[in-house]
Image (cartoon, grey):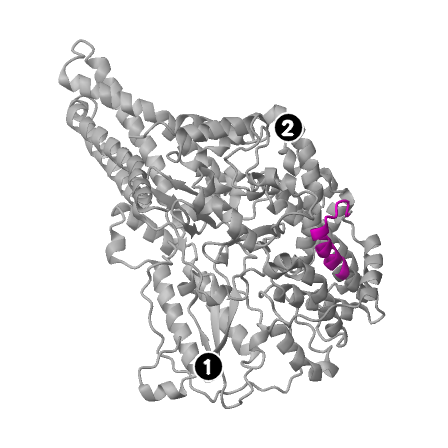
Amino acid sequence: MPTSGGERIKASAFIPVSTAAVLLVGSTTLFFVFTCPWLAVTVSIYVPPCSGILFFFVLANFTMATFMDAGVLPMANEDEDKDDDFRAPLYKNVDVKGVQVRMKWCASCHFYRPPRCSHCSVCDHCVEDFDHHCPWVNNCIGRRNYRYFFLFLLSLTLHMVGVLSGGLLYILHHLEDLWKLHCTVTLVVVSVSGLFFIPVLGLTGFHLYLVSRGRTTNEQVTGKFQGGVNPFTQGCCGNLEYLICSPISPKYTARPIKKSTVRIIPPFLRPETDRQIPIIKVEDNGIQCHDIQNKRPSTDGMEEPDIRRLNTPPPLPPKPDPNVLKSHLATLEGRVAVAPEQQGGSSRGHDLSSELILGRLDQQLAFPSGPISAPLQLNSLTLNSRSLTLKHAYRHHNKLPVLYPEGLISHQVSPGLFPPHNPLSNRNSLSYDSLVNSSDAHYLAQRGGPPLHYHPHFMTLGHEGSVLQRPPPHTYSPMFMGVTRQSPQDLSQQALIHREASPVRYDNLSKTIMASIQERRELEERDRVLRMQARSQALYGCPDMGLYDIPSRRSLPADSMRLPGSRGPTPPAYGSREFLMSTGILGYGGTRSPLSSASSSSLTRAPRTSSSPLQSSSSLQSKGRSPSPAYLPPDRQAPPSSSSSTLPSTLSSASPPDIPP
Amino acid sequence: MANTHNMQDLHHQAAVASKVYVQRDYNSGTICRFQTKFPSELESRVDRQQFEETMQTLNNLYAEAEKIGGKSYLEGCLACMTAYTIFLCMETHYEKVLKKIARFIKEQNEKIYAPLGLLLTDPIERGLRVVEITIFEDRSIGSGR
């Protein structure tokens, strides 16, 4: 960003907060000087002190909301993401109180964002329990300062009520000399207060609603828990208690780092090794089961070489046996649920590789050695998928078929080496098929559109079991209509997936497979999209919404040229962080779109109604970056959430151009 | 991570072989809790029981820090009444427990993990996202890990 531009942006960021401060302090001072003396005499002597205390409270909370660190997470060290960068999936699933929550990889901060954490593009950092970026205090509102923001709103509302009523009372008693100084000033103060009272009241009401539901603004506007269960809520009272009484969490940045004085000098002690403990490769410290100790007495000798193999990426192997490939292809055609309708030349390699893997796995799953070897293969696949960078996979995709069979073959010789990750290993074959499907859905979802509307549906499927009763709404943007076409059977398989242990494992397991299958799906989708687009042209008017940070959406016109797949550059790996960094990151910092402030939701904010995108895009264009971005999308909320959307609608229409006193 | 100030020690200071990251356990929500599962990389370096005990104690300390109770409420009230100026002079409850945690980690490092060639990093330095365990090269054995 050029310095002049940066300075301009920096200076303009202070305008709303300065205006708010000036109006607040100015109006209140005028009130105290011109109106309060009469009120003290006429109404009660306690009016000025109470007003004063309340105003003091307003100022204190305003100051804390403005200057307090919201819970900024520092960037991860290089070492931390050394392994993961470019090789790991964009999303990781975690189980929070039984509900699947997705953690997204933050390309700027180099870690998977904890649940409820979001990256603020205005401030360019991740904030814990991110609520929104408030321009009126020029600060992010997050875990550490949400209570101050909330109390500021409450106290401001009360203060405004006081000022309004006091002022009105004064005016009503001095109607005869309305143009005297005192009266005029009071009139001005009352007008200003009255003007901002409605939006402030609306915002207060909105946050009261959020607290009662245990949601953040970010979650509310992205509709994260619209249809599903919110695992973070502790009930209305619990949420209020948490808001008011919880200890203030510490600041993570700018901490005094104490240098460790511990000296580490070899030789080191070793723990007793008399137990036969099989080695478990923990990819990402997911939930692993350790009840394998009594199962692998004979394989210790094999452990060492495999540990090394696990820990270092395997070298690129020579070409596979074409007969093997053919047989796998044949095996796979019947197993893989994804219909390879469109196979471009360049994607063929991917398809082949994913089919290869699946075929290989299917074969091994069918081995009489039973469930023991299956997890082994799944595990070796994990290794391969981790070691084979998506960068490699998608830039040198013709090498992909080369790598996998070799890797698998090499692991085949040591069956049963690795303990089953999944205690329910007999469900591996089923889970693997559903893995394929679910991974598709995952990655489809990642591309934007309905995902966060869609995800809660199937995220909670495993627990509610009402898989078949949740067809996605038809008002999704046409581009992602493809997602809605999953059969109930697929959904039920996904439900199974989510019931099983350690979903994180599955992501790592087959990310490359998923990515290649994803590509195939994309090709199909693009086709569908093109057809839809032709239809939607009439509805939308301008297909390029501009408000989307969804890279795929932006690139759609270009993609249509690459549909056949054989021409053009390698399609980006939508599932990879690399893709995010190359295109998605534009949504974070590059374009500075207002919506990108709640960046994790930026990929998911597809409009649900046909009219809303136009409305929102025009509203965005007119307002630029000044309004609190979190309040804009609410007016795009689908009708089902009528109660929640009415308040935000009021806000979004009223708040941006208005400045609270 | 282990700093030596003595030139002699530099010759003996172990090199960093690798780092293991113990992630947060979000099963119970956003409260601070780390996974107690034993990472495989530490299999040959430390006793599983010992490690799990350390992690459990750490989790207990964080639970204590985040406990919502009378003390935290009083602290909030006091802060409110003094227009939050109390934060300029007084340490919050969480910060006090964090200091306790830092002492605990230092003690664990000195007594248990440094002799094993490991070093635990205080998670607060990583934004309470991970517990970083540095594994040092054991030169006496010669074959690395």
The secondary structure type at the circle numbered 1 is: helix
Which residue is most to the front? A567
Q: Secondary structure at mark 2?
A: helix
> Numbered disc 2: what chain?
A
Which residue sits furthest top? A176
Seen from the viewer's position, the closer of residues A229 and B122 is: B122
Q: CA distance from mark 1 to mark 2?
A: 66 Å
Magenta part, dominant SS: helix
Q: Which residue is mark 1?
A: B112
> In the rendered view of the protein, which quadrant contains the C terminus of chain A?
top left
Determine the residue positioned at 72% across, 48% down: A344
Q: Is residue A442 covered in magenta?
A: no
Label 2 packing within 10 angstroms: few (<14), some (14-19), many (20+): some
Q: From the viewer's side, name the closer residue of A622 and A500.
A: A622
Residue A180 as seen in the image, left or right of residue B61: left
Report x, y in % for residue A308. Answer: 62, 78
> Which span of residues is magenta-colored?
A340-356
The x and y percentages for residue A109 are 45, 56
Q: Position of residue A358 (x, y in %)?
A: 76, 59
Rendered view: A185 above or below A319: above
Horizontal side, residue B92 vs residue A281: left or right: left
The residue closer to the viewer here, A413 or A526, is A526
Check disc 1 and give the amino acid type. Answer: Ile
Residue at image mark 2: A536
Left or right: residue A627 compared with residue A386 = left
Q: Amino acid at mark 2?
A: Ser
User: Could you tell me which residue is drawn at 38 percent across and 49 percent down?
Assistant: A70
